[in-house]
Amino acid sequence: MTPFSQAFRVRWADMDPNGHMRHSAYNDYAAQVRLAYFYECGIDFQFLEKNRCGPVLFREDTRFLKEVRLNEVVTVDLWLAALSRDGGRWKMIHFMEKASGPPAARITVEGAWIDLVTRKLITPPAQILAMVAGIAKTEDFQEVVAK
């Protein structure tokens, strides 16, 4: 299965004083790809508000592999690395690659779905379950076991 991906041209606002992309911009691009995928599947802010739910992150881990500089083009893709049986908890991985070929970063996020009113973790609505099921799976995909 081919992963969902988007290409970005690195902006001036994403740079740090050392002349390369600032650390938090990597995570911003990954978040943009996740939300773009959600939107493509019909899971927009109106859907989330109507269904009183949203994604919540527990952990974000970024491995910086190669410098990214101003105006370079990077492609960020989305993979599903783990999912609980009920679809409530998940781990997604983003690989960022430079147009010139070398991988620039690996961003791993672990999270769940939360009820926006009760602030409790939930099993998401069927449309969200279908959306998550459509994410390309990593070769080492596994089931999330509750802790």
Image (cartoon, grey):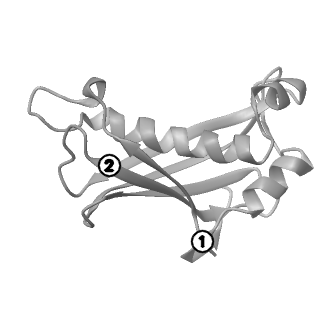
Reply above or below: 50 against 71: above
* Left or right relative to 80: residue 66: left
User: Which residue is tagged 2?
Assistant: 73
Which residue occupies 82% across, 25% down?
46
Which residue occupies 8% across, 32% down?
18
- Judged from the image, the secondary structure of the residue bearing numbered disc 2 is strand
Earlier sequence position, callout 2 versus callout 1: 1
2 or 1: mark nearer the eye? 2
Expressed as whole percent of the image width and height from the top left, the position of residue 50 reads 89, 25
Residue type at the position of mark 2: Val
Mark 2 residue crowding within 10 angstroms, few (<14) / some (14–19) / many (20+): some
Residue type at the position of mark 1: Thr
In the orientation shown, which residue stands out farthest toward the top?
Answer: 117
* Left or right relative to 140: residue 25: left
Which residue occupies 81% across, 48% down?
128
Which label was assigned to residue 2? 1
- Judging depth in this view, the residue of 2 and 49 nearest the camera is 2
Which label was assigned to residue 146? none
Reply above or below: 17 against 63: above
In the orientation shown, which residue stands out farthest toward the left?
Answer: 18
- Judging depth in this view, the residue of 7 and 132 nearest the camera is 7
- Judged from the image, the secondary structure of the residue bearing numbered disc 1 is loop
Mark 1 residue crowding within 10 angstroms, few (<14) / some (14–19) / many (20+): few
Which residue occupies 59% across, 73% down?
141
If the image is split into quadrants, where does the N terminus sit? bottom right
Expressed as whole percent of the image width and height from the top left, the position of residue 59 reads 48, 43
Expressed as whole percent of the image width and height from the top left, the position of residue 144 reads 66, 63
What distance separates the C-alpha of mark 2 from that of mark 1? 20 Å
Expressed as whole percent of the image width and height from the top left, the position of residue 14 reads 29, 29
If the image is split into quadrants, where does the C terminus sit? bottom right
